Image (tube, rainbow, N blue to C red):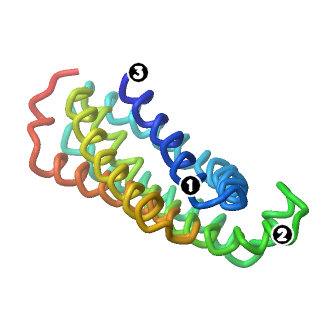
Amino acid sequence: MFQYFISMSTFFLFFVAVERIGQAELAMANIVRSVYIVLFIPVNSLATTANSLVSNTIGAGHKEEVLPLISKIAKFCFVIVGVFSIVVALFPRLILSIYINDPVLIDGSVQALYVISVAILISAFGNIYFNEVSGTGNTRTALVLELITLAFYCLYIYIVAIRLKLPLAVCFTTEIVYMFILMALSVWYLKKGNWQKKRI
């Protein structure tokens, strides 16, 4: 629960940082974030499924099947969100018009929408592999990995949004940074960690 609270609190930090750039950017950020959350639904669903399947597989004594299983789920997730990302990339203004009818805000949000289309593809692997860490029963390790990732995330937000006040699309690359680091740390742990000694 604490891990989830810390993770969600960074969204607040993101919007505080974007607000310093301008009110229009804040409005566009809210629109793009709404689209991102919708795109994230299949990722989150499959990540939760992966978490349960990993625990069941380890509990059944088939630890050697864990990594191949997660690889299949991650690839399946990548295909699903890949289709959505292509649709978003091909019809960004149509997608944005569902949320708002202001042409200025729509035009200003298009580049950021392209960025989250890439971020969601990385999350197909990052979020699922991270949930595998939790599924192994090592919740403390998952918390540590999350905290390390969020430290980089917050530092990146501070640099691009508060210090440099870069465009909104650049600010949304924080999602790419977050998911990439989370994926890298999770894969490293699963290959090097002692999760196979854990009993569930």
Secondary-structure class at tag 3: loop
Q: At 54% across and 46% down in the image, what residue appears?
A: 16
Q: Which residue is mark 2?
A: 94
Sequence-first disc among 1 and 3: 3
- In this rendering, position of residue 194 left or right of residue 151: left
- Please tell me in which quadrant of the rendered image residue 59 appears: top left
Q: At 26% across and 27% down in the image, what residue appears?
A: 139
Q: Are marks 2 and 3 in contact (CB under 8 Å)?
A: no
Q: Nearer the viewer, residue 64 or 87?
A: 87
Q: Which residue is mark 1?
A: 20
Taking the image as drawn, is residue 78 in sight? Answer: yes
- In this rendering, position of residue 125 left or right of residue 142: right
Secondary-structure class at tag 1: loop
What amino acid type should be assigned to the residue bearing mark 2?
Leu
Q: Which residue is mark 3?
A: 1
Q: Is the residue 188 above or below the residue 4 in the image?
A: below
Q: Please tell me whether mark 1 or mark 3 is closer to you in this view.
A: 1
Q: Give x and y (percent) for residue 122.
A: 44, 62
Q: Give x and y (percent) for residue 68.
A: 29, 53
